[in-house]
Image (cartoon, helix red, strand yellow):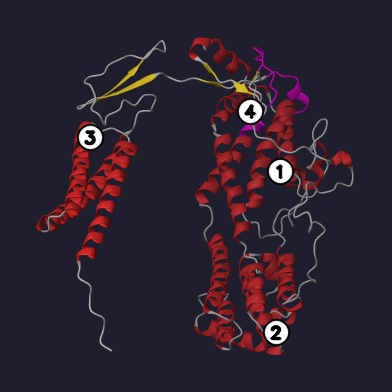
Amino acid sequence: MTVSYTAEVATCRRFGCFWKLLARWRASIYKLIWVDLLAFLASFYCMAILYRFVLTKDDRSIFEELVIYCHSYGYLIPLSFVLGFYVSVIVSRWWSQYITVPWPDPLAVYVSALVRGQDEHGRLMRRTIMRYMCLGLTMVLSMISPVIKRRFPNYEYLIDAGLMNRNEANIIQAMDAKFPKHPKYWMPIIWAASICTRARKEGRIWDDFSLKSMIDEINKFRAGCNMLIHYDTISIPLVYTQVVTLAVYTYFMAAIFGHQWIERKEREKAYSNIVNYYFPLFSTLEFFFFMGWLKVAETLICPFGDDDDDFELNWLIDRNLQVSYLIVDEMHNDHPQLLRDQYWDEVFPNELPYQVDGHRGEHPEASTAKLDLSKITASVAKHTSHEDLDWIQYYGEEGEEEHEEHELRIRFAPREFNFSHSSLSVSISPNGSLLDHTDEPMGEDENTLSGVTSMDEFDRLKEERERERISRQIQHTAMTLELMKGELGANPSPTNSILSQQIEQARSIQSAFSRSQQSMRSSRSQQLQSLVTRSSETSQQTTRSFLVKKRQQQPPQPPPPQ
């Protein structure tokens, strides 16, 4: 099982927390490379003894040329690049394999919540579904892990462990005889899906959506099992593994000769270091690091074996079956009594209690909460003059001026808006004084609007739409008045003359609006609305008068016969 040391490095103090891990032996670098290190040192000292005590003078010169050659060209091997990239691929693959291992807990929660029934048949369905899922995963692990294969070498051991019945073993063996080429780990998963379908037909699963949720979780579990098979059959390309292994061992074979101490008349510092005469210190450290790097890759390339850092699959199988039975049987439709929590009246706690007040920590703040803005504020204040600022003063209840410690400063850009029959001109004064650029005098219904912000395209479009709507309303009113005028012209009377005057007044309002619409294309909709309101009121008054007059002119109808 992977060696865990998280608790020992949870808090770092003084010189660090990794020093205490260097004395461990299990899953350590010492346990992985001590044999290779002894072989390297033994070969190194054998070559040193051969050079110093065995070889003749002529043979020593040949050995010295070999040392110079290995020392000069041994560093041409790109060991760091090749080994570093290979180990990074291995580590990412190792973690992906662990993430791929499926867990039956989500499906167990679905089965416990959705498969109803407290009777023996309902309990048998729930337990059998989870047993089949655990059986399928165990069959997959026995195919990819030597540890699990030694524990369950055949179906008899699965029967003894309680993961399989004799009848189920006979069915799988018969299928193996018909189709021997393909693994049969998916058969228990299919059985589990069939039991879910049967539970739906029997009404133990209430709706089709619940059945679909369970089938989706079963398919997700099957996909994880299938991916484990793919990781086992599709390995990292063999050529890359061979390149890395040859690069590491060739480099240190050259280092056995290239790091030797030699004695020459024309001594060179690179080959006459006295430290190498007794012990190759930095050569040993180099071997320690690079060979340890390679051993890490060899350990993690298959995490389903017997190494110290491999996954504990035996524990995984036992745990899955136990937890699955616990969820779907022992905990089925069971929960503690519903009681009010201690924060029921407070709705939520302001702060949870601590056993020791010293453990109370500070609340996290945003990264810019304590940012120093004094330089920015000073720069803004430096380039801002008092002439460009308007001061808003606050007055108390009795009219006395109250000077606040912090006053609000609002800066306005002075603008003047001038309307004409053809265009709109905006003048901005740099010194705060208004500029007069009136093109033509306005009519009676035209006003100059000052101090209003300029309108963008959206506002102009909105005002155009409003004018069109008002124009349609006035046209409808005009048509109504024309009809009423024709009706009144047929019957002249004093009342009709009054109504005609009112109609003429409404028509004058309509023509005034037409003139206003032509001259003020950018005026505000409030002025237009006032014209519409006046026109509508006049039209309504005229209509009411007309209806009253018509009602007076109609002769009284005779009473209905008895």
- Asked whether the viewer can see residue 385, the reply is no
Q: CA distance from mark 2 to mark 1?
A: 57 Å
Q: Nearer the viewer, mark 2 or mark 1?
A: 2
Would residue 447 be found to the left or right of residue 261 on screen? left
Kindly indicate whether the residue at mark 4 contacts the one at mark 2 (C-beta within 8 angstroms). no
Residue located beneath label 2 in the image: 123
Q: Measuring 34% from the left and 32% from the top, which residue is drawn there?
A: 455
Q: What's the mark number on residue 36?
A: 1
- Nearer to us of marks 1 and 3 is 3
Q: In the image, which is nearer the foreground, mark 1 or mark 4?
A: 1
Q: Earlier in the sequence, mark 1 or mark 3?
A: 1
Q: Earlier in the sequence, mark 2 or mark 4?
A: 2
Magenta highlight range? 254-280
Give the residue displayed 67% in from the left and 46% down from the top. 295
> Three-letter amino acid code at disc 3?
Ser
Find out whether the residues at labels 2 and 3 contact each other: C-beta distance under 8 Å: no
Percent coordinates x, y for residue 466 in the rendering: 29, 44
User: Which numbered dot is residue 258?
Assistant: 4
Q: Which badge, 2 or 1, is on the more N-terminal residue?
A: 1
Q: Secondary structure at mark 4?
A: helix
**Residue where numbered disc 3 is placed:** 516
The answer to whether the residue labelled 2 contacts the one labelled 1, judged by CB atoms less than 8 Å apart, is: no
**Nearer to us in this view, 492 or 123:** 492
